[in-house]
Amino acid sequence: MPVCTKCNIDKPREEFHRKRKGSVAIRSTCKDCTNRDNRRWFYENREKRAYSINNWKERNRDKVRGYWKGFHQRNREYRNKIKLEHKRKNIDAYNRNTKRWKKGQGPEYNSWCAMWTRCTNERSDQYKNYGGRGIIVCEDWKSFKNFVRDVGRRPGPTYSIDRIDNNGNYEPGNVRWATPEQQANNTRVNRLIEINGECRTISEWCRVLNSKVSKETIRQRLKKGWAPIDAITTKTHIVVQDYCI
Ligand SMILES: [Zn+2]
């Protein structure tokens, strides 16, 4: 049984603090004595404690400030990076100052911008086909919200904006989301073929009549003066299945 050096009493080992975690050696003073002494020192030297802490702060002021400065700097850089990424991808972004989510504009915004530049910016490459031809955007669509309200959100990634009447303006009723095929069928260059009183382009007729003749041959046949139905439906070559040796 160890003896406490303060109070000189024999006590079991459980009554003593261990010196270090994991070591077998124990303190020479019992738990009661050490706790009492520590508590007394803590209350008696209040000013000394405060002084030592403040002194440490004063000595390491630059270090501490530098640490926080670096921390804020790194944080700001990170935030800006994420903001830029969100802006580029048109993702919804959280604004920490206003504490609300800002709606990403999305692909509709891009096509809205492109529409305006095509029709109004004379330095644009496509201006001669749009603004140069006298095609304008209606006044109501100066705000992006009205544009989305009238045309709707884009139904799929391959869709793009299309005017139903090719010589009409960008205005509600004349604009829709169209697939690339629909777009190609609706250009000024395509020539329309009339069968049974219906006007359609070559590729549309091919799909409707389910013919596998290439568009180039159909075009050549029409040049030679074939009837439109024959030009689209007659097969190019006959496949010989049975033959004699
Ligand atoms: Zn003791």
Image: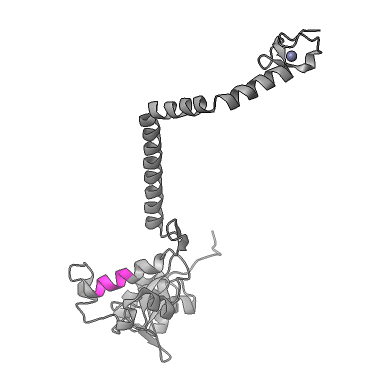
Q: Does 159 sit left or right of 26 as displayed? A: left
- Residue under the image location 74 percent in, 10 percent down: 4
**Eyeballing the image, is 199 above or below 18?**
below
Q: Residue 87 location in percent, x, y?
A: 38, 57
* Visible residue check, residue 199: yes
**Quadrant containing the N terminus in the rendered view:** top right
Name the image quarter holding residue 203.
bottom left
Quick one: which residue is furthest to the front in this view? 44
Name the image quarter holding residue 230.
bottom left
- Residue under the image location 31 percent in, 77 percent down: 142
* Image coloring type: one colour
In the image, which residues are magenta?
113-119
**Eyeballing the image, is 56 above or below 240?**
above
Q: Residue 144 location in percent, x, y?
A: 36, 74
- Residue under the image location 54 percent in, 64 percent down: 241
Along the line of sight, which residue is nearer the eye, 229 or 175? 175
Name the image quarter holding residue 164.
bottom left
Is 208 covered by the magenta stretch?
A: no
Q: Does 171 sit left or right of 94 as displayed? A: left
Tally of marks: 0
* Visible residue check, residue 166: no
Along the line of sight, which residue is nearer the eye, 137 or 244? 137
**Eyeballing the image, is 127 above or below 169?**
above
- Name the magenta segment's main secondary structure: helix
Q: Residue 224 location in percent, x, y?
A: 30, 79
Quick one: which residue is furthest to the bottom in this view? 197
Along the line of sight, which residue is nearer the eye, 115 or 85? 85
Q: Residue 213 location in percent, x, y?
A: 42, 71
Along the line of sight, which residue is nearer the eye, 126 or 97? 97
**Eyeballing the image, is 34 above or below 225?**
above
Q: Quadrant of ligand 1?
A: top right
Q: Does 150 sit left or right of 23 as displayed? A: left
